[in-house]
Image: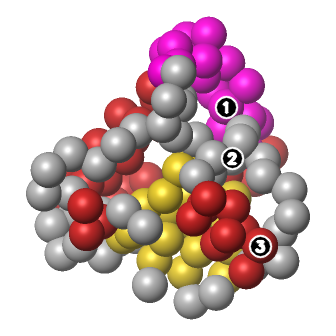
Amino acid sequence: MKIILFDGVCNFCNTTVNFMLKHDREHVFRFSPLQSEKGREILRQQGRLDTNLNALIFIEEDKLMEGMDAVMAISKYLKGCFRLIYLLRFLPHRVTHTAYALIAKNRYRWFGKKEVCRIPKPGEEDRFL
C-alpha cells in the first residue's frame, strides 16, 4: 500500500491531496492527515514517535520518505506531464530540499489554514485511512 500522510489543516496540502485524488485514476494512494489518530498510528508503526507537520510523508513498501523525497517518489505514479516532477532528482539535493523547506515553512502564511482536518468527500471514503 502507498500511503500519503499530510498536514490536514494546511490549505496548500489539502489542495495537493485534491490534485492527487484527481490524477490518481488507478487509486494507488491512500491518504491520512498527520493529525489524525490513524496518521499517528501509522507513524508509530514506522518507528516514528514525533510528528513533523512540516513534511509530507510517503510510505511505500514500509519505506518512509519525507518532504521533497516524498514528492519525487509520489510523482513516479502520476500520469502525464506531472510525472516530470520526478526529474527533479537530478537537481542538487540542497536546491530541491531548500525550496521544499521554504514552502513548508511559509505555507500557512501564503496559503492559509483550516481549523479542522479535511474530511473525505462522498465517493472518496475508500481513499482515506
Q: In the rendered view of the protein, which quadrant contains the N terminus?
A: bottom left
State the predominant SS element of the stretch in magenta.
helix
In the rendered image, the quadrant that contains the C terminus is bottom left
- Element class at badge 3: helix
Residue 5 in percent (x, y) is at 56, 57
* Residue depicted at x 57% and y 89%: 61
Task: Assess whether mark 1 and mark 2 are in contact (beta carbons under 8 angstroms).
Answer: yes
Task: Tell me: 35 left or right of 84.
Answer: right
Residue at horizontal 58 percent and vertical 41 percent from the top: 7
CA gap, disc 3 to disc 1? Answer: 23 Å
Give the number of the disc on residue 8.
none
Q: What residue type is labelled 3?
A: Arg
Res. 66 image quadrant: bottom right
> In this view, which residue lies farthest toward the bottom?
61
Q: Secondary structure under badge 2?
A: loop
Asked whether residue 2 is in view, the answer is yes
Query: What SS does tag 1 mark?
Result: helix
Q: Mark 1 points at which residue?
A: 104
Q: Residue at x 53, y 50 (%)?
A: 33
Can you identify the residue that label 3 sits on?
A: 44
Residue 55 numbered tag: 2
Q: Does the magenta stretch include residue 70?
A: no
Question: Residue 2: image x %, image y %?
Answer: 45, 77
Q: Check contact, mark 3 vs mark 1: CB within 8 A.
A: no
The magenta segment is: 95-114
C-alpha separation, residue under disc 2 versus residue under disc 1: 7 Å
- Amino acid type at circle 2 is Ala
In the image, which is nearer the foreground, mark 3 or mark 1?
Answer: 3
Amino acid type at image mark 1:
Ala
Within 10 angstroms of label 1, few (less than 14), some, or many (20 or more) residues?
Answer: some
User: What is the quadrant of residue 62 in the picture?
Assistant: bottom right
Establish if 39 lies above or below 42. above
